[in-house]
Image (cartoon, helix red, strand yellow):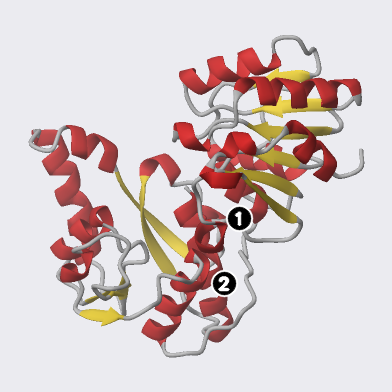
Amino acid sequence: MGDLMHALPALTEAKEHFKEIEFDWVVDKSFSEVPKWHPAVNKIITTDHRNWKKQLLSPNSRKAFRSVIHEINSTNYNLVIDMQNNLKSAFVSFMCKHQVIGMDSKSVREYPAHLSYNKKISISKELHAITRQKILLSNALGYSTSSSNDYGISDLEFKEPSFNLPSEYVTLVQNASWKTKQWSIPNWQLLVKHLDNSGIEMILPSGNEEEYQRALKISSFSEKAHVLRPLPLNQIAYIMKKAKFSVCSDTGLAHLSAVVNTPSITLYGPTDTKLIGTEGKNQLHLVGSNNNINSISVDDVISKLPSM
């Protein structure tokens, strides 16, 4: 999810240089709501890489993949650009009849993705992912990129959930796909206790059953902490935009908080924030020593909370 959000400023910048430009975006169906937030996106072409990987040889997977490639190949695009430059996206690029632009062998995220590209651009891996994608698109289209980052999204696709939200609340994003990116349950519980004592309501989203159960443990003693079962991204985006602030693990929803301009504290362990940390207004990074997210104390977080 974060990778998709890193691409948004590149589209905004391209639109500033070419007012009539439109993009079709090939994206995994799990995150297909994200491209719709950008007004420069015309059509979404969805893939299902997770199921295709599990059922690579099944007739249904092969048929679905052929359908995606046919949709791409039957459209007369001016340019096809692989913004992700990893093996999954490169596989789709390789099957395209179009000339595909991507990064070279020393720049791609996953080797040997570069073999799928007809035109290869050299971009330093020492740059932030947002900057890398802006350089890639600006090189492909022939303009100079700038240092400013504007996600350029519209919230028209955001959906108010069917339940009533508190009039004022904060979001606590405790889930993360890697164990090394998860702040411990006792730490989250202490933060919840502090916020509870401050009288503020809390929303804890989750992406699957395991994350939901973890959030229940974190919030079990507080009537002000409300755990959400998995919701569509358009509803989560609405919730996070309305939040007073967020405290986040290093996960996709931390980037979403940045995209919607919600003041956020994001907790990091093994991630290099210079390369893929959240970017935007009022975004604060707390980085654990020795790549250990749990070396960040609850007091460290509390001391950085916005005034409530």
The reply to whether residue 11 is visible in this rendering is no
Q: Are the residues flagged by discs 1 and 2 in contact, CB closer than 8 Å?
A: no
Q: Position of residue 168 (x, y in %)?
A: 86, 33
Q: Is 219 located above or below residue 277 in the figure? A: above
| Residue occupied by mark 1 | 278
| Residue at x-position 55% and y-position 61% | 38
* Residue 228 percent across, percent down from the top left: 62, 22
Return the x and y of residue 215 as percentages of the image width and height: 61, 20
Q: In the shown orientation, is residue 302 left or right of residue 132? A: right
Q: Amino acid at mark 2?
A: Thr
Q: Which mark is residue 300?
A: none
Q: Which mark is residue 12?
A: 2
Q: Residues within 10 Å of mark 1 (few under 14, many from 20)?
A: many
Point 84% across, 41% down: residue: 303
User: In the orientation shown, which residue stands out farthest toward the top?
Assistant: 221
Residue 250, percent from left and from top: 56, 43
Vertical order, 68 against 210 (above or below): below
Crowding near the residue tagged with mark 2, few <14, some 14–19, many ≥20 C-alpha atoms within 10 Å = many
Q: 18 or 194: which is nearer to us? A: 194
Q: Amino acid at mark 1?
A: Thr
x 45%, y 63%: residue: 42
